[in-house]
Image: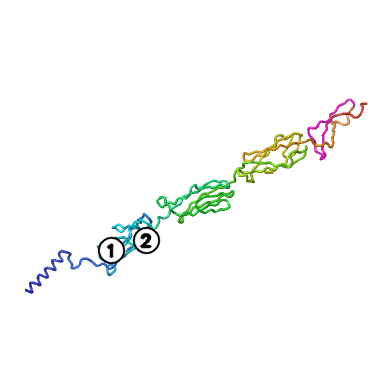
Amino acid sequence: MSGIRRIFAVITVLAGWSCGSTQPDATEPVADIVVNPATPTVALNAQLPLQALVRNAAGELVPDASVTWTVENSGIATVSPAGVVTGVALGTTQVAASARGKSGIATVTVTRTPVASVVVRPNSAHALIGSKTQLTATAYDAGLNVLTGRGITWTTNNAAVATVDVNGLVTAKAGGAATITATSEGKSDVCQLTVSALPVATISITAGATSITQNASTTLVATTKDANGTVVTGRQISWQTSDENIVSLSTTSGSTVQITGGLADKATITATSEGVSAPISITVTSGQVDKVVVTLAANPIKPNATTTASAVVYDANQKALQGRTVSWFASGAAT
């Protein structure tokens, strides 16, 4: 009887092997699982594959071990059966790889999609002193998708010419050039800004005197102002006279001109800058005669011969007076 039992036991063991494998235990025990990378970072809506290293007690890989992937918080990240993690929302969660009763853990952090480029519009601009210009900056990812909610820092390289606030509003301060820069997460773009003064809107002329005598001089000064009534300097000014014989322009130096009276009459002097003009009327009065100098073409002359006499009228400064009427008469009797 005992022999029969032993034979049955052997048959039972063999029958058990034939149902599983050719050896008593075909499933190799798993000692530990290592997930690589252990602390990965994945961008929002991006994917990252994880790798599970299943090892036995000797540290050797167990190639036939089936790995199951799970995630602690699927609201932050999801994981596929192949171990591919997808960022769903900003935050941190754990992803586990399990096989034969052992698990390995990776701590996954989901971050914002990094800024790959920043574009400023307009990229160049012209502004007048005192004006404001609104700039915009847009952040893009590597796929040129617009990224919203990113912080933008605005700076200027020349605050004396133009300043910029936190919203990209530029204020022109003085003539010149400035580079306005927008930066987000280390990426930046610029707008090249040129600032010029407001154009001349009005001109006023101040005269040392509006009535001068012949040969006398006075100075005219033109003042240019912008539309705000602010004096603007350094502008090119041209001067003209309506009649050079009445009032001549002696010397011109920018906003200042010296005029000299000629014939006794009235003339208009005009100052022009950037298409804007202003006139002023100048009256020239007769100067006081100091002396008359007569010159004969021939002197002396022969009896019964003729010659021509000319007279020049001078003022006290020994300058010739124009337009004067000269009366002629002889003081001696003919012989």
Mark 2: amino acid: Thr
Q: Quadrant of the C terminus?
A: top right
**Residue sitting at the far bottom:** 2
Q: Give the side of residue 331 with respect to residue 3, left or right.
A: right
* Dominant SS type (magenta): loop
Looking at the image, which residue is at 24% across and 67% down? 29
**Tag shown at residue 98:** 1
**Tag shown at residue 92:** 2
Specify whether residue 194 is painted magenta.
no
Residues at marks 2 and 1, CA–CA distance in whole angstroms:
20 Å
Image: magenta residue range: 303-326
The 10 Å Cα crowd at callout 2, few under 14, some 14 to 19, many 20 or more, is some
Looking at the picture, tell me which residue is in the foreground, 189 or 161: 161
Q: Give the side of residue 94 with respect to residue 313, left or right.
A: left
Q: Give the side of residue 66 with respect to residue 219, left or right.
A: left
Secondary element type, mark 1: strand
Secondary element type, mark 2: strand
- Disc 2 and disc 1 in contact, CB within 8 angstroms: no
Mark 1: amino acid: Ser
Relative image position of residue 279 (x, y in whole percent): 68, 37
The 10 Å Cα crowd at callout 1, few under 14, some 14 to 19, many 20 or more, is some
Q: Quadrant of the N terminus?
A: bottom left
Relative image position of residue 11 (x, y in whole percent): 11, 68
